[in-house]
Image (tube, rainbow, N blue to C red):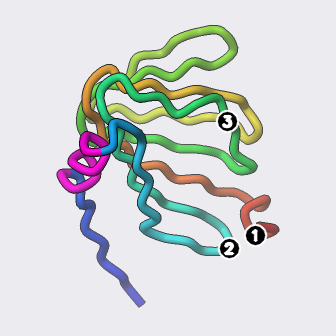
Amino acid sequence: MLELITLPIDDAIAQARATGARQTRALVRTPEARVMLVGMASGSEWPEHKAAGRVVVRVERGRVEFLIDGTTHALHAGELATVEPGETHTVRALEDAALLVIVAGPAMSAR
């Protein structure tokens, strides 16, 4: 079975702007993976956190920076990054942004 999902990027950014904070919408939830659309208002932060599985992030719109192990990495729309399972990281929005976030791995089935 094929399920088509539209990414409501404009809505995610509008909700983040309205609250001035990060807004997360679950798009897919299976035993093996989670797929989320995250809207971030400019200047907002996703405080330090980690995930049990491998994280893949694609910046759909805007610019963000990841802080991992004391190093800052800037990501722009169209760029993709991965984070190792259990690796602590922080995300800051340098401008209004939308991120497609996928967390996958065997550890997900235990959740």
Type of residue at label 3? His
* Label 1 element class: helix
Image-based side of 111 in relation to 39, left or right: right
Residue 46 placement (x, y as % from top left):
52, 34
Q: Is residue 19 above or below residue 34?
A: above
Q: Amino acid at mark 1?
A: Ser
Q: State yes or no: residue 63 in magenta.
A: no
If the image is split into quadrants, where does the N terminus sit?
A: bottom left
Between discs 3 and 1, the one toward the N terminus: 3
* Label 3 Cα neighbours within 10 Å, binned few <14 / some 14-19 / many ≥20: few
Determine the residue positioned at 69% across, 45% down.
Answer: 51
Where is residue 108 drawn, in percent x and y? 72, 62
- Which residue is farthest left? 10
Going from the N terminus, do you reach mark 2 or mark 3 first? 2
Q: Which residues are magenta?
A: 10-18
Q: Amino acid at mark 2?
A: Pro
Tell whether 10 sits left or right of 77: left
Q: Which residue is mark 1?
A: 109
Q: Residue furthest bottom?
A: 1
Instruction: Find disc 3 in the rendering and name its residue.
Output: 49
Residue for badge 2: 31
Residue 36 x/y as whole percent? 45, 57
**How many other residues sit within 10 Å of disc 1, few (<14), some (14-19) or many (≥20)?**
few
Q: Secondary structure at mark 3?
A: strand
Disc 3 to disc 1, how far (Cα)?
20 Å
Looking at the rendered image, the disc whose residue lies closer to the viewer, 2 or 3, is: 3
- Please state if 51 lies on the left or on the right of 43 as rendered: right
Q: Residue at x 39, y 54 (%)?
A: 37
102 lies above or below 29: above
